[in-house]
Image (cartoon, rainbow, N blue to C red):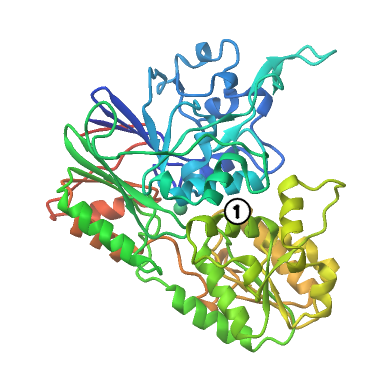
Amino acid sequence: MRLTFYGGVNEIGGNKILLEDGERRLFLDFGFPYKRHKLFYEEYLKPRPGAGLLDPLTMGLLPPLAGLYRDDLVTPGLWKQFEDFPLYRELERVDDVLLTHAHLDHSGYISFLKPDIPVYSTAVTAFIAKAMQDSGKSGFDQSVCYFNPVAWDCPDGWKQPALVSDSRTPRQQRQFCIADRAPENLSADAIQFWTSGFWGKTARQKELVSCPLKDHGSSGFGLLCFPVDHSIPGACAWGIETVSGWVIYSGDLRLHGKHSGLTRKFIEEAAKLRPRALILEGTNVGRDTNVTEREVYDNALKVISRAKGLVIADFSARDVDRLLTFLQIAKDTGRKLAIMPKDAYLLKTMHLLEPETPEIAQESSLVVYQDTIASKSPAIWMRNLCKEYESKIVLAEDVRSAQDKLMPSFSFMDINELPSIRPKPGSLYVFSSSEPHDEEQEIDFRRLHEWLKHFGIKGFGLPVEKNGEWKIPEEEKGLHASGHACGPDLLSVVHSIRPEIMIPVHSEKPEFYVDKLKGSGIEVRVPEAGGVVEV
Ligand SMILES: [Zn+2]
């Protein structure tokens, strides 16, 4: 059994691990490599959609594996240019992709894969991936669930051919296989959302298929899906039975979240398999402790309950636990939480599968913020959503006239709304997310501080620069519960599962495991980028 690590090595995210076991070949995640992408690209310099796979292959964002990608993205003579690349290979067939969760650093580059390679995931992950695509930016690298094919063509008067949208070929869908529940247990509304969208035929999607995971595929080997707790609903780990024994792949996980029971159950079940290998994330190996969601609630409530003017809450709404934390704080402080339309779309989607997710129409402390757009025709989903929640829409002027009654959930990218809102001096910006990871994010924080200064808004929990380092001030810490387990928790995962071989991924410090597992009887193998680990 061979594992090839095409991503997630010495980087947080971009996981793409090829598992080959005799005739069987599958990928563990196929994520977007943020770190490598940012080395070369920025907002106004991106891989050229018209050049198809050429840019991401040349720049090392995608592995040069002929036979793996969408045929319509393969430009004439493409593979000839990559035959001398050390990682070049022809892949005859890939059976499937096992997706752990809907964060783009795990799912994003599924966009490029052949549509007939089925994607195995939990129902929640499949639905969130679709909600993100329906309500997100369009683009050739944002097409996890469906895509519009392109064709090699030249517009009139142009000599350079390029891949341009091909209106003759209908939109294509990817096959998702649901690992954690049978489609017949999904509601009619859920099926309708998946196959044709909330409001009719906007984004048709292939039928959902349920997968008998035991005796998977033609090989007859077992496959197990373990739900785990992470900062997005629906996350799971995978167990794959191979000729060399069970391989466990953790995806991203934590032991300190609201649903830590899931992760504990996974550890217990995985240990019972006496696995040969454990592929484990290591995002937060450098941290010794965790902040819990309960602490986030307590700390944020303390500062928000004292606020007199507007409160802006900056958190990732895809982290539904965090959204519920701030919804509770809004209730406890007599405010309404105003979420952005795309976040409302996600909640509406989640409600289809998890009935305990608040229903926007029924939740008196939840409203939808309609921002300023410069277009006569907003996206169809946005129009439909705003029509459905008409009585729940608030505009900038509503926020302006009731600043102590509302709490918009904005990120830095929504800060442009402030000139319309005109927050009163003394308003509060509560930051409940992670610290900057790179220079670009540091520049954004610098700008955010300028915005707050300009409007006389007090920031809380915001990283500040001190001696070239960006840190949250000690007295303002505790507003973010990470999606990832800290070092001691990760070690307890390894010791409890007790694999023969441990392989660190999704980490900038994989040698942590080498140091800490010395003498434990567990062999740590640190993969190289594009390297092979034989088991
Ligand atoms: Zn993640």
**Residue 487 visible in this rendered orientation of the protein:** no
* Secondary structure at numbered mark 1: helix
Which image quadrant for residue 362?
bottom right
Q: Amino acid at mark 1?
A: Glu
Which image quadrant for residue 520?
bottom left
Q: From the viewer's perspective, is residue 205 above or below residue 327?
A: above
- Name the spot of residue 373 as percent of width and height, x first: 82, 53
**Residue 204 visible in this rendered orientation of the protein:** yes
Identity of the residue drawn at 57% across and 24% down:
53
Quarter holding the N terminus is top left
- Residue in the foreground of this view, choosing between 224 and 413: 224
Q: Is residue 386 left or right of residue 487?
A: right
Identity of the residue drawn at 63% across and 66% down:
360
Q: Residues within 10 Å of mark 1 (few under 14, many from 20)?
A: few
Q: From the viewer's perspective, is residue 520 above or below residue 298?
A: above
- Residue in the foreground of this view, choosing between 88 and 408: 408
The answer to whether the beta carbon of the residue marked 1 is less than 8 Å from any atom of ligand 1 is: no
Q: From the viewer's perspective, is residue 485 above or below residue 311?
A: above
- Name the spot of residue 234 as percent of width and height, x first: 43, 54
- Name the spot of residue 378 as percent of width and height, x first: 80, 48
- Residue in the foreground of this view, choosing between 120 and 54: 120
* Residue that badge 1 annotates: 439
